[in-house]
Image (cartoon, rainbow, N blue to C red):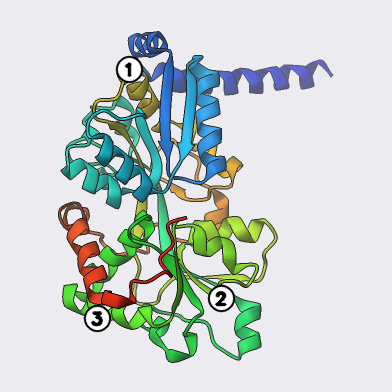
């Protein structure tokens, strides 16, 4: 019995030491300055449970009051553009970097030399000017309702061009490029895989099969299991979340000709009121203290820190973080706004009430 107690105590001490070691990587002077700020306001573009879990743990660790608001990346971009250097929030957390890049180009993000960025597995996962830092990586693909496809006598699409088949008319959902970074990533991906003009023509043809463009990038995944959406384009980790909630009629499909990925990020908003708390948030977000909470809160993206614990669920469902195209982040940074404008110009009158903003 004494031996068992000793072993348990040793394990607890080891776990405690690991937690302390993680905390010790952050400068004590920064922690003190952040505590003097006393509060932090977060705009979050990951899922609500993921956002809430990260914010609550930060508050528990540092005693700094955290308030947060869950918004799509497009909504955050619109808010901080309107606030123009006088933001209501201090940091942005989660959501794909395509809108972050647009905001960086517009001078709306604050550069910060984060110490914990040394744990990023590659410079791919941060802005060249340190205006945002990656925390996770999500694979783009399709989620399909196998029961509905069987009922309709249809095969599942296996590649991007399959989505253009007339038998899928009215069955496909994707997100709205005006409100969702996911949709911006889809546009950039097609431009990079097909070339600009062919990509725009692709979207004209794809639009004929789209039933709805959702406000949020995760919108399609949440409707596949119940059959309201038969084929959803989005991030496959969102599909994993739905499957683990009990929707075993969902199949995840990685496009055969290749796909791209999001880098979910965090950034400091330029002109924020609690600058030291914002810097501490970034250090925290780039640590196991934060990212290892993800799967506990229903988020199964691959993590991009060398000291993080990868979610086994993503691998179990056949996802491979390296089975993606060499996504050109610089092109996305410089041209996303143009490509989105070109998308809507190509669709013309077809850009109708299927594009949801609520």
Query: Which residue is disc 3 drawn over?
Result: 201
Give the Cα separation between the discs numbered 3 and 1: 47 Å
Dot 1: element? helix
Which residue shows up at 51% across the image and 46% down it? Answer: 47
Which residue shows up at 18% across the image and 72% down it? Answer: 196
Query: Which residue is disc 2 drawn over?
Result: 230
Residue toward you, 161 or 302: 161
Task: Tell me if residue 308 comes above or below residue 334 in the rendering.
Answer: above
Question: Is 35 situated left or right of 201 in this image?
Answer: right
Q: Position of residue 265 (x, y in %)?
A: 35, 42
Circle 2 residues within 10 Å: few <14, some 14–19, many ≥20 = many
Residues tagged 3 and 1 counted as in contact (Cβ below 8 A): no
Give the Cα separation between the discs numbered 2 and 3: 23 Å
Q: Position of residue 348 (x, y in %)?
A: 26, 75
Instruction: Give the number of marks.
Output: 3
Q: Upstream in the sequence, badge 2 or badge 3?
A: 3
Q: Give residue 100's quadrant in the image.
A: top left
Residue 316 seen in this snapshot: no
Mark linked to residue 276:
1
Residue toward you, 78 or 264: 78
Dot 2: element? loop
Q: Quadrant of the N terminus?
A: top right
Give the Cα separation between the discs numbered 1 and 2: 46 Å
Dot 3: element? helix
Q: Position of residue 120 (x, y in %)?
A: 33, 39
Which residue shows up at 43% across the image and 90% down it? Answer: 166
Question: Is 151 situated left or right of 190 in this image?
Answer: right
Residue toward you, 307 or 272: 272
Task: Tell me if residue 139 comes above or below residue 77 in the rendering.
Answer: below
Q: Position of residue 222 (x, y in %)?
A: 57, 60
């Amino acid at each position: 019995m004494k031996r068992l107690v000793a072993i348990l105590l040793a394990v607890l001490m080891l776990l405690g030491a690991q937690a302390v070691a993680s905390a010790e990587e952050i400068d004590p002077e920064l922690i003190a300055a952040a505590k003097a700020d006393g509060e932090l306001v977060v705009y979050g573009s990951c899922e609500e449970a993921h956002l809430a879990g990260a914010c609550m743990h930060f508050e528990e660790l540092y005693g700094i009051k955290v308030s947060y608001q869950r918004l799509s990346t497009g909504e955050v971009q619109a808010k901080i553009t309107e606030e123009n250097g006088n933001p209501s929030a201090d940091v942005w957390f989660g959501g794909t970097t395509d809108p972050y890049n647009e905001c960086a180009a517009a001078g709306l993000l604050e550069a910060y030399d984060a110490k914990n960025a040394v744990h990023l597995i590659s410079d791919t996962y941060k802005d060249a000017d340190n205006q945002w830092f990656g925390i996770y990586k999500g694979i783009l693909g399709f989620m399909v309702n196998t029961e509905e496809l069987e009922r309709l006598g249809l095969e599942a699409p296996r590649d991007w061009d399959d989505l253009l088949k007339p038998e899928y008319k009215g069955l496909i959902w994707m997100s709205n490029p005006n409100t969702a970074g996911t949709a911006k990533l889809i546009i950039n991906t097609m431009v990079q895989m097909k070339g600009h003009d062919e990509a725009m023509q692709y979207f004209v043809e794809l639009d004929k099969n789209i039933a709805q463009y959702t406000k949020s990038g995760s919108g399609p995944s949440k409707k596949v299991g119940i059959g309201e959406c038969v084929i959803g384009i989005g991030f496959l980790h969102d599909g994993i979340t739905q499957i683990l909630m009990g929707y075993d009629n969902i199949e995840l499909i990685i496009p055969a000709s290749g796909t791209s990925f999001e880098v979910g990020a965090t950034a400091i908003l330029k002109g924020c009121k609690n600058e030291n708390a914002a810097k501490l948030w970034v250090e925290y977000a780039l640590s196991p203290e934060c990212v290892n909470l993800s799967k506990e809160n229903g988020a199964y993206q691959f993590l991009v820190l060398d000291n993080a614990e990868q979610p086994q669920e993503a691998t179990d469902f056949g996802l491979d973080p390296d089975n993606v195209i060499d996504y050109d982040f610089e092109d996305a940074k410089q041209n996303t706004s143009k490509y989105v404008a070109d998308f809507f110009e190509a669709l013309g009158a077809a850009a109708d009430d299927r594009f949801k903003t609520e």
